[in-house]
Image (spheres, rainbow, N blue to C red):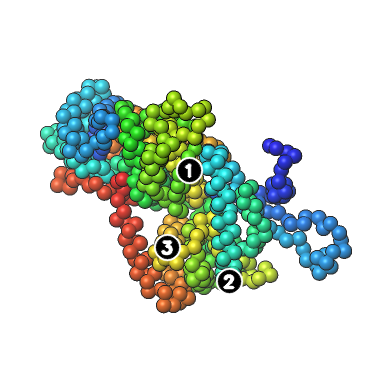
Amino acid sequence: MPGRVRKRSPLKAPERPYIALGLEGSANKLGAGIIKHSPDGSTEVLSNVRHTYITPPGEGFLPRDTAQHHREWALTVIKDAFAKAGVSLHDIDCICYTKGPGMGAPLTSVALVARILSLLYNKPLVGVNHCVGHIEMGRQVTGAQNPVVLYVSGGNTQVIAYSQQCYRIFGETLDIAVGNCLDRFARVINLSNDPSPGYNIEQEAKKGKRLLSLPYTTKGMDISLSGILTSTEAYTLDKRFRPHGPSAEDSEDADIITPQDLCFSLQETVFAMLVEITERAMAHIGSKEVLMVGGVGCNERLQEMMGVMARERGGNVFATDERFCIDNGIMIAQAGLLSFRMGFETPLTKSTCTQRFRTDQVHVAWRA
Amino acid sequence: MTGQTKSPSLKLLDTAEKVSQGAEAKIYRVQLHPTPVCSSSAAAESGEVAEKVLLKYRFRKQYRHPSLDASLTKSRVAGEARALIRCLRSGVNVPGIRMVDAPEGILGIEWIDGKSVRFLLGGGAEGEEEIVEDATDEPEEGDLPPEEDQLQEYGISQDALMGMIGTEIAKMHQADIIHGDLTTSNMMLRHPSSRKGLQLVLIDFGLAYTSTLVEDKAVDLYVLERAFSSTHPQSEPLFAGVLKAYETRMGKDWAAISRRLDDVRLRGRKRSMVG
């Protein structure tokens, strides 16, 4: 029989309402969100505004151009967030910003905005780990207690479980992130970047029928994705490949490969690997809950596969919609406010950014 | 269910008792020859009891595409059986093989009477839950029982157990087999009262492969080190005991593996999070 160990949460209920502003800009999304923690323990999202930098098909977002985008939109997005929340900058308790991980130039341009606001309005700064932001917002929105977290996005692929005030990484990608793998393949077959390459891959995959053989590379709890991307790309050079679907001379059951088949095969293989390592982590720590966060967590096929796996184990999946899955400011506000309530502040002289900031480097003081 | 075309191994599974479910497979216990067909058989005369067999059933994963699932299951069952055979030939303590049905995903191996090392070290059983309460002034309750009790039954000290683990892993690595998933849950201590006596047995070779590379052996040890620190807090001295025994058994090969292990440890920490 599973035993039960009781623990107490170190986070005290707030004696007054706390409000925090969160600023996020680690990749091509610029987000500002305002959150409120009330004394009765409830959490309220006052506003959550986001603006995405979209590049033409076949191109990714470059750090310099992305930073430029963030600088241009920062004031509009922040003003919009305050207008929607109906509060002013004087009312907030702290300004939370993404310290890392992410792309250097966009990170620093957003941190600069945070620093200036902090000096202008004399508000403390709180540097937040982007991944912890995702996890905390996911826990808040779904109400999952102690889930295994699958964090899948354009820059990160990790299976995370909480233990002893630390989000431990049980498994992760050894090379590129899953979102990066999907996005790059979308560029190879020239899919649009609007609203996101991953979304368009998902739509194309629905039309695919044929499962092509691709490497299946789980290594213990870790996975490797770069080889799969190369193999999928190699199929586009195959003489059976038809970039625009079956041509006139192809018969009904001809041996051809369409871009849709490739999207389908890529998704099926990669997601099967993700579900497998998540299941292994669940078996290891004995949790029945899975929480999916990050941009790829919006993918309905991945959610479906994860749901099947969780049901087989008698558990359930928690997923959020695009408002909270895709990078946003509110998650930074949530994680930042939790650490602020535990007495954590980032002094101005330490308010730097870092591209490399592992999830397990954060001391999770607010959990038992 | 396709009732009439059921394979013999699936029928055997029907008579088995389910013990647990891991990530990969369901574990069943079954008696081979449950009812002796003829009472005058040689087996009955020699007083041999029906042997207990563990069936590891890699059931169909509904979330995976059927053809992908079939090919993975087949290659993993065959791979595990191959690794076990290699270990048995090299004298590593692993469960003996009783049957293999790769297409159905069933592997039958020897049943081991004993407990997992994880349990014996007081790491709890797999699947222990934690509940978080809000901040209150209630006193702490529910302390774990002292862990020494569990080992006493086996008449062995913690240090000796660590030595056995190190030696067994070294034997396996000398045969160029990499376990791929070394954790304290994947090691069992055979009960002293069983026929083969007290023994440390390595189990679950689902991720095993063969390799002569120093790199792979070092990563194998690193995986175990991480497993130790995550399931048994404050276990550094214990793992040092494992390495000591491993070093003794490996002899001159140890120096290279030790150097590489230091590299691997660093690698884990520096590894970047960005794609």
From the image, tell me which residue sits under label 1. Answer: A213
The answer to whether marks 3 and 2 sit on the same chain is yes
Task: Tell me the kind of residue under disc 1.
Answer: Ser
Query: What subunit carries mark 2?
Result: B
The residue lying furthest to the front in this view is: A249
Horizontal and vertical percent for residue A194?
31, 27
| Image position of B6 (left or right of A58) | right
Marks 3 and 1, Cα distance to the nearest angstrom? 26 Å
Which residue does the image show at 51% across and 56% down from the upper left? B207
| Image position of A131 (left or right of B99) | left
Please indicate, yes or no, whether residue A258 appears anywhere in the rendered image. Answer: yes
The answer to whether marks 1 and 2 sit on the same chain is no
Q: Secondary structure at mark 3?
A: helix
Which residue does the image show at 28% across and 33% down from the upper left? A58
Task: Tell me the kind of residue under disc 2.
Answer: Gly
Q: Nearer the viewer, residue B1 or B165?
A: B1
Which residue does the image show at 35% across and 37% down from the upper left? A185
| Image position of A160 (left or right of B19) | left
Task: Tell me the kind of residue under disc 3.
Answer: Asp
Query: What subunit carries mark 3?
Result: B
Horizontal and vertical percent for residue A351?
18, 44
From the image, tell me which residue sits under label 3. Answer: B216
Horizontal and vertical percent for residue A115?
15, 38
Residue B91, label in figure: 2
Horizontal and vertical percent for residue B200?
57, 68
The answer to whether marks 3 and 1 sit on the same chain is no
